[in-house]
Every structure is written in structure tokens, then in C-alpha cells.
């Protein structure tokens, strides 16, 4: 499997589910061949929700680099950058809707717009339930534009024994979708 380029973007929004982003970033760092850079962007209230839900403060240790959501003077705000993949985890319905409408009012939305226009990989991990018709239509629009919608819906066929195990079923799926080699349970291949 071809690995993505050495630079990826992880955006964390204010939707509940920061544990997914926390485990995702940790798992990306721990890969045999980790990304050269993991650019992390938090929406306005995402950091407070991260701390509330995970009980820890976010720290950006190499290869993680944090970017301000209001700063458009960053490499991946332009298609000339070499960031190959963007993962929005968790993805609020607000950011999903703004991206679907092409409203680049912050760095997360602008970076997603760039990823889509350059035909690179955008993975959105919505953590909302139930969906209303507006959510579904926005997901349809994004899918038609090339995004991958990967709801934060844990799987059970690996027989997870803890909440952490359930979270990792989603995280491992995201890592696989991003094109990284993930040590994950695969149906009827691990038995």
C-alpha cells in the first residue's frame, strides 16, 4: 500500500468525541512510518471540549505542529502545499455544512476546500446522531466532491472489551482510509 505524503492535517472541531482525535493523533505518531508532520487545528471551542472529555491538555510534540484556526498564512491554506490528507475528527455538523457550501471562513474550512479542489483525500468523521435531512444532504454534497464520510460508529466484530477498544475500531478505520498501514482487525482475516 502506498503511504500518503509526509504531511497531513488533523482538524478537531467542537463536536463531542475528542477521544477519537486524541487516540488518532497518538496512533499516527506511533506508526512504523509516521507522517513527517501532523498539522493540528482546533476550532474555537474544540480545545475546551478536548480537555473536558479527555481530562488532559493538548500538547504538540514532534511531529505534531499546532496551527491557529484564524491564521490563513500557513502552507496548507494554498494548493501549492504538499499536504496529501486532511482528517476532520470529530467533525461537527456546522463545519460539515460550511465546507459543503464552500464557506472558507476559518482555516479548517479553507484547508478542506484546498484538499477538495486539489483532489486530495478529505476524511470527515461526524459524531452526531441522529442525522437530519440537512446533515445527510451536506454529506452527499461532500461525498460527490470527493470527501470520505466515516461516521464515528464503532464496530463490534473484533469483540472489543473496553470503551478504549471501541474507540480504536474507529481510529484504526480512519488510519486505513488515510492510506497508512494500520495494525487492525479485519473481518475473517484475524480468526
Image (spheres, grey):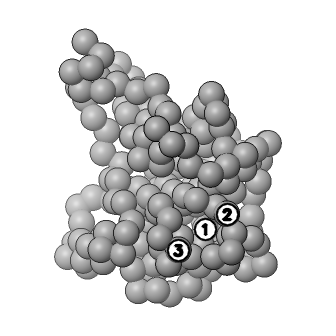
**Number of numbered markers:** 3
Look at the picture and state if 22 lies above or below 72.
Answer: above
Assess whether mark 2 and mark 1 are in contact (beta carbons under 8 angstroms).
no
**Of discs 1 and 2, which sits in the foreground?**
2
How much space separates mark 3 and mark 1, taking CA atoms? 23 Å
Lower position in the chain sequence, tag 1 or tag 2: 1
Residue 149, x across and y down, in percent: 34, 59
Q: Is residue 134 left or right of residue 12?
A: left
Nearest the camera: 69 or 6?
A: 6
What residue does disc 1 label?
43
What residue does disc 3 label?
118
- Which numbered marker is on residue 82? 2
At x 59%, y 72%, the residue is 111
Q: Secondary structure at mark 1?
A: loop
Q: Secondary structure at mark 3?
A: loop
Badge 3: few (under 14), some or many (20 or more) residues near its Cα, within 10 Å?
A: few
Q: Is residue 139 left or right of residue 183?
A: left
Q: Is residue 35 left or right of residue 102?
A: right
Question: Which quadrant: the C terminus?
Answer: top left
Look at the picture and state if 95 lies above or below 120.
Answer: below
At x 35%, y 19%, the residue is 161
Residue 2, x across and y down, in percent: 51, 42
Q: Based on the displayed image, in which of its 4 quarters is residue 96 positioned?
A: bottom left
At x 50%, y 87%, the residue is 103
At x 30%, y 16%, the residue is 190
Q: Secondary structure at mark 2?
A: loop
Lower position in the chain sequence, tag 3 or tag 1: 1
Badge 2: few (under 14), some or many (20 or more) residues near its Cα, within 10 Å?
A: some
Amino acid at each position: 500500500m502506498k503511504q500518503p505524503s509526509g504531511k497531513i492535517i488533523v482538524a478537531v472541531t467542537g463536536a463531542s468525541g475528542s477521544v477519537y482525535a486524541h487516540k488518532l493523533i497518538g496512533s499516527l505518531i506511533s506508526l512504523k512510518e509516521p507522517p513527517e508532520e501532523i498539522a493540528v487545528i482546533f476550532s474555537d471551542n474544540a480545545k475546551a471540549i478536548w480537555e473536558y472529555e479527555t481530562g488532559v491538555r493538548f500538547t504538540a510534540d514532534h511531529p505534531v505542529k499546532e496551527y491557529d484556526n484564524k491564521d490563513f498564512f500557513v502552507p496548507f491554506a494554498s494548493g501549492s502545499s504538499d499536504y496529501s490528507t486532511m482528517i476532520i475528527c470529530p467533525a461537527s455538523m456546522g463545519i460539515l455544512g460550511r465546507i459543503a457550501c464552500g464557506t472558507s471562513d476559518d482555516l479548517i474550512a479553507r484547508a478542506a476546500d484546498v484538499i477538495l479542489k486539489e483532489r486530495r483525500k478529505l476524511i470527515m468523521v461526524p459524531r452526531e446522531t441522529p442525522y437530519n435531512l440537512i446533515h445527510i444532504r451536506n454529506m452527499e454534497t461532500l461525498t460527490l466532491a470527493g470527501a470520505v464520510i466515516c461516521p464515528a460508529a464503532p464496530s463490534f466484530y473484533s469483540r472489543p472489551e473496553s470503551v478504549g477498544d471501541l474507540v480504536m475500531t474507529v481510529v484504526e478505520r480512519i488510519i486505513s482510509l488515510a492510506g497508512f498501514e494500520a495494525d487492525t482487525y479485519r473481518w475473517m482475516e484475524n480468526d
